[in-house]
Image (spheres, rainbow, N blue to C red):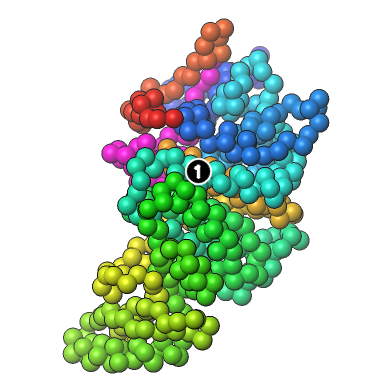
Amino acid sequence: MTDCSQLSLGFLGRREVVGRFDGGLVSSDGGLLLLREVDRRYGVTAAIAGCLRDRRQPGKVRQSIHDLVRQRVYQIACGYEDCNDAATLAGDPVFKAAVDRAPESDPDLASQPTLSRFENGLSRTDLYRAAQVLVDLFVAQTAAPPKRIVLDVDATDDPTHGQQELAFCHGYYDTHCYLPLLCFASPDDGPQQLLAAVLRPGNVHAGAKTVVILQRIVARLRAAWPDTPILLRGDSGLALPEVYDWCEAHGVDYLIGLSRNSRLQALAEPFLAHARDEHRQTQTKVRRLHEVRYAADSWPHERRVIVKAEVTTQGDNPRFVVTSLQDGTPDGLYQRPAERGDIENRIQELKNDLAADRTSCHRFLANQGRLLLHAVAFALLTLLRGLLHGTELATAQAGTLRTRLLKVGVRVRQTVRRLWLHFASAYPWQHLWRLLLDRLRASPA
């Protein structure tokens, strides 16, 4: 009689390969419990949940706000970006354990409808308060007052589909989209950490709401470190008079790209002429940095502008940067905006590795809530990466961290006194687990 519980998968030499679905409680995301320890140490999801008002009827509540936040953020960190994924993950033994539920004896986690109601129930006040947690986390993790803080602000496209609120066609990206604004901070030129992720309609200027975000972030940073200089960096999308004026009024220095125009081109022409002559003689790329004083019609006074006079075989390539910094050479100052190229890597991590552009709800506020949850998942992985200093994964991107540390097969066994996790003996990154747990226990809460 044929055993229907067995699957014949061919032969390996003379041995028949037989499969059976009797391995017990098994998960492909065993490393989530490592991320849970990072979360418990730094209290990230607990702080987010504490900012969200629970408007549900208490007698009908089965999932706490903290449980919903943890479930959603942990799913995103492990590569499950949709609420629909809860249909298969609600009973996963590791996800249940990560949300403090016994895999065998406790109820399953929240369903997709519950998570969707949660996202659509977030208010503007909830989101504003929760967004501040990212800034507080940055302050808490910077032990000594930094000598300088660099804020990198940039916009990115978030294509939309269907009739979503405040989704408009954007001419530059040539698609219907939202236009999120992201702010990262680097203490003493260290790793960039996400401080803000603000969803905006698709028809706004690239620099819209920059001042609003800076007001909130700079106030918190100044409260923690009143004497620490702050430098704002951005591309020409931030080149707005209100940004310069606010920075100058509040003692924030800036290095911001300027779009080319006829007046700037005329100021750069003498420098470009010399660069062309040198290029004709050497037949190699020539790049020289100079500075001028310049004032657009909407500016109240002249400002220092760094001019890059570059000539290549393709022709002239002038670039311009406006700055409030009065010290430093043009070469040194121009290099600083060039260093912000790393923000593109962080944005790609958010979009490619954590699917932060998965804003598929109809309501705009619900999509802002989704973006915030993706930002929290990114913050958790940033904390995990920070604990890996001095190792081969010290600079790994979020996708690599997930592949090597979170997506780990495990068999789960629940007994009266313990929850046993049986990992593969040949798992190649087990030494990093031991190191991470030692550093978590040694790090301040």
Look at the image and say whether residue 243 sits in the magenta stretch: no
Which quarter of the rendering shows the N terminus? top right
- At 69% from the left edge and 21% from the top edge, which residue is drawn? 107
Other-residue count near label 1 (Cα within 10 Å), few / some / many at <14 / 14–19 / ≥20: some
| Residue 221 location (% of width, % of height) | 46, 50
Q: Nearer the viewer, residue 299 or 76?
A: 299
Above or below — where is 301 with respect to 64? Answer: below
- At 37% from the left edge and 67% from the top edge, which residue is drawn? 337
User: Is residue 426 visible to us here?
Assistant: no
Report the magenta residues as a range. 385-413
- At 59% from the left edge and 39% from the top edge, which residue is drawn? 48
Left or right, 378 with respect to 88, comes to: left
Residue bearing the label numbered 1: 136
Q: Quadrant of residue 209?
A: bottom right
Which quarter of the rendering shows the C terminus? top left
Q: Quadrant of residue 166?
A: bottom right
| Residue 147 location (% of width, % of height) | 32, 52
Above or below — where is 169 with respect to 186? Answer: below
| Residue 324 location (% of width, % of height) | 39, 71
Element class at badge 1: helix
Above or below — where is 337 with respect to 120? Answer: below
Q: Residue furthest left?
A: 281
Left or right, 247 with respect to 323, comes to: right
| Residue 130 location (% of width, % of height) | 60, 44
Q: Looking at the picture, which amino acid does disc 1 mark?
A: Asp
Look at the image and say whether residue 391 sits in the magenta stretch: yes
Q: Nearer the viewer, residue 192 or 255?
A: 255
- At 44% from the left edge and 77% from the top edge, which residue is drawn? 258
User: Is residue 373 visible to us here?
Assistant: yes
Above or below — where is 14 with respect to 32? Answer: above
Q: Nearer the viewer, residue 33 or 57?
A: 57
Q: Quadrant of residue 98?
A: top right
